[in-house]
Image (tube, rainbow, N blue to C red):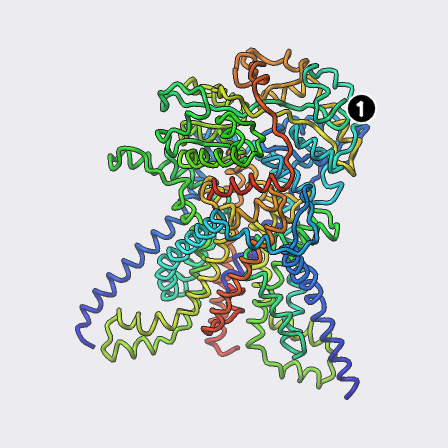
Amino acid sequence: MKNKLGLALAIFIVLSLSACANATPAASASGLSGELNVFVWTEYMPDTVFQKFTEETGVKTNVSTYSTNEDLLAKVKASNAGIYDIVVPSDYMVKMMIAEGLLEPLDKPKITNLQNIGQGYLNPSFDPGNVYSVPYMSGVAALVIDTEKVAEDITSFSQILDPAYANSIVALDDPRAVIGAVSKSLGYSLNTVDPTELAQTDVKLALLKPNIKLLDSDSPKSAMLSGEASIGYMWNAEIAICLEESDRFKAVFPEEGCYLFLDNLCVLKGAKNSANANEFINFILRPDVSKLVSDEYPYTNPNAAAVELLPESYKDNPASNVDPAIFTKGEYVADLPASELERYDDLWTRFVK
Amino acid sequence: MKAPGKRGRRERIKNSVSRIFAGLVYLFLYIPIAVVVLFSFNTSRRNIVFEGFTLNWYKELTKNTALLEAFRNTLIVSGTSTVIATAVGTLAAIGMFRHKFKGRSLIDALLYIPVVIPEIVLGIALLSVFSIARIPLGLGSMILAHTTFCIPFVVFTVRARLAGFDKSIEEAAMDLGANRVKVLFGITLPIIAPGIASGAILAFTLSIDDIVISYFATGPSGTTLPLKIMEQVRAGVKPDVYALSAVIMLVTFLGVLGSQIIAYRGAKKMALAKDKGDL
Amino acid sequence: MKRAKKKELISLLAMVSPVSFWMALLIALPLIYILGISFCGTDEAHNIVLSPTLRNYARIFDPAIAGIYLNSLSVAGLATIFAILIGYPFAAIMANAKPFSKTLMYVALMLPFWTNCVIRLYAWRTILGSNGTLNFILLKLGLISKPLEIMFTRGAVVLGMVYTLLPFMVMPISTVLEKLDRGLLEASSDLGARPATTFLRVTLPLSAPGVFAGVIMVFIPALGFFFVSDLMGGGTSQLIGNLVERQFKESFNWPFGAALSVLLIAATLILVRLYTASGGQLDDLGAM
């Protein structure tokens, strides 16, 4: 006990000293002031963007991250209004959050850069007239294959259920994305609630299970790049980074159709820094800023003005500049009521045990 | 005393086996730390294999405001919680030691709960209460949560010290006319000070590396270092996180070394004084 | 005399009321709430509704969920056994060391725990991965022909648990062993008992409370440490902790998560009850 006493006392002092040395809040003057609390997916908004925003406006940004849409909703509901200002939900989650009265209408006159967004991305069915949301990034969940380890020509999701690929897949740790893809491989909707269809999905999930080496929503590319896994099921930007890193990787968009998403910038109801939030959204929609995001996280950028600034490497990368035909063939997630979601939760529990 | 030679040899074998075993345990504990230090000098950004030597990440670290701010938050949360928990816990330990009263066992039971139940249960329970009471999640809620799980450890540590405390000293002082507050600050607290200090240190140790409870109690302004690192680890560690860990480790190591030297000298002096019969 | 009584009361209140309020508001109240909602349901918008039901408890007997419980128990059980196998001899060596080496050993044991445990766990990936350091060395030496699959298995989760919780096993055992009456050991050996017999008949029974305290300090956290299973198991070997976390963080089913927590608390209380029944002191669990 005595040892520990001396030991930690010294550390306490040293740490406190370094805290003092550290406590120099950065403050600069401009039209706006105060803070902005952003709640965003991991690996989705680069630090450079936040730094640039702070430099230009003097607004300090606090960034927290989540890994799935459900994670976002749960945290927003559990915390009190005003904790976060900006969130980045996907299509179906925007709809759910509007329905639950969690979002605040945007200050549209302030968001002049909305004109930079491609026409096809505006006025979506989940938020007609873009009252609550503006597009941030879009994309698909697809497969990436390490061709040095996988000889077979993979074109469909059902092929990766082959026992030959035991313990070799890294997949998203996202129930809707994984269960949805398996349902689709059977020719069903990724939102199916039909009990017999879900029972068949469950059987296929049991075939997929032994092939899964790990589940990772945040940085599945790491397992591919390190050679830990030879097949990956992940978001398209993660695939795009794999393709950039090495020629041995190949992107595969399963012929059964992909899981699609359009992620959106929204302001939460009761946001304490609502003016800053609208300013930030307009800032993100600026072509040069949107380009910064795509440089780091190469999703399919709905910002037409930004795409013009992007290098050939973006346009030539099939996983970034995803073929529009894939979007036509794919399917978006629908929000499910609690009783149906519990079915999905049970399927998932069986899958991960 | 049979065959002392044989016994000596057996003793020697036992000693070397012990050394090897302890060495292996330390190897197990320190291999990951060696990796952390080594990879903080790695040129590769993706950090999967060691490619080459660089000091760049230490420079990057000074620019990583998010990481440094998380570090500052950690010190604020752990520092404040330690102070509050030590004050509340010490008072409680003395109060419960001095007085027998109804409800004492109830308080005791409440104190044991956070020590034994899985952290995750306490985490979600606190989150629900914060959410009902409309306590904003952030530094404040983090301090409340950390203080809550630190208090019992302070109480138990101080109580252990009080077990050897002679109540008659307090009574004597009171008979001589000192009031209760004076007795508390002038006599009781100084005597149990080492117990209070070790309680505070234990609280700080637990608080500074807590993940599970913090994970539920945190909000945007309350991201502490363990949470930030968890976030970055999930996204694939960049070597500047390793660099920060290496710096913290070095500081800790030097702090420990320094305090041990001081403690060792102090103990020596004390032993000398004792030999002379001064004590 | 009456005045003295009153003063006594004031002093008692001043010292004990802060802790009472704090614990009532932030321990008792939250746990009562958890117990309460474990009997509630949710509506279609995932809000908690007050309609008394045992459904959440019934759901625990679903084979999949029972499977996670079993997996969790086996991971925590294995971690505890390995922690004893490593921790007991280590504690014995520490308890018998000279004061200076004892201090050194203690400091060296605790030092790693001042560095963030997530980062230390993550480092294991670099060591044990398919293309990690260990496989690299073994392949170079020709001891194996293809990489060992260690990461993202249940074994890796157990290793992570032992790594994170080892000191909590070592400390209580070493404290007990230090206090052990050496006279007893000498008496045993003087009476002709072989070292093994002395250990089994004298040392082990006398150090049992320390081992039991260590078991509680390792086994219970191991049931809930979801981040260890995330980092080392890659999400494929889930524990009760992960299941609880998912109910609160993703599935919006707080009542079910609460029911799972109540079960965890019950398991804990049974273990602690056994501990106190066998003569263990609760305070020993909290003071390291």
| Residue A154 visible (yes or no) | yes
Residue ID for mark 1: A108
Chain under disc 1: A
Under circle 1, the secondary element is: helix
Identity of the residue drawn at 24% across and 34% down = C142
Give the residue type at disc 1. Lys
- Horizontal and vertical percent position of residue B117: 55, 59
- Residue C200, percent from left and from top: 30, 70
The picture quadrant where one finds residue A322 is top right
**Image quadrant for the N terminus of chain B?**
bottom left
Q: Is residue A49 above or below residue C69?
A: above
Q: Residue at x 75, y 42 (%)?
A: A81
Is C247 situated above or below A40?
A: below
Quarter of the view holding residue B159: bottom right
Looking at the image, which is closer to me, A317 or B225?
Answer: A317
Residue at 74%, 19% in the rendered image: A114
Specify the quadrant of the image occupied by residue B205.
bottom right
Q: Name which residue lies at 64% across and 24% down.
A: A262
**Above or below: residue B11 compared with residue A24:** below
Observer-nearest of A49 and B11:
A49
Residue with the most extreme front position: A196
Nearer to the camera, C124 or B64:
C124
Circle 1 residues within 10 Å: few <14, some 14–19, many ≥20: some
> Is A200 on the left or on the right of C248, as rendered?
left
Q: Position of residue C269 (x, y in %)?
A: 53, 65
Q: Is residue C28 left or right of residue C75?
A: right
Residue A296 visible in the current orientation: no
Q: Where's residue B66, x and y in %? A: 63, 36
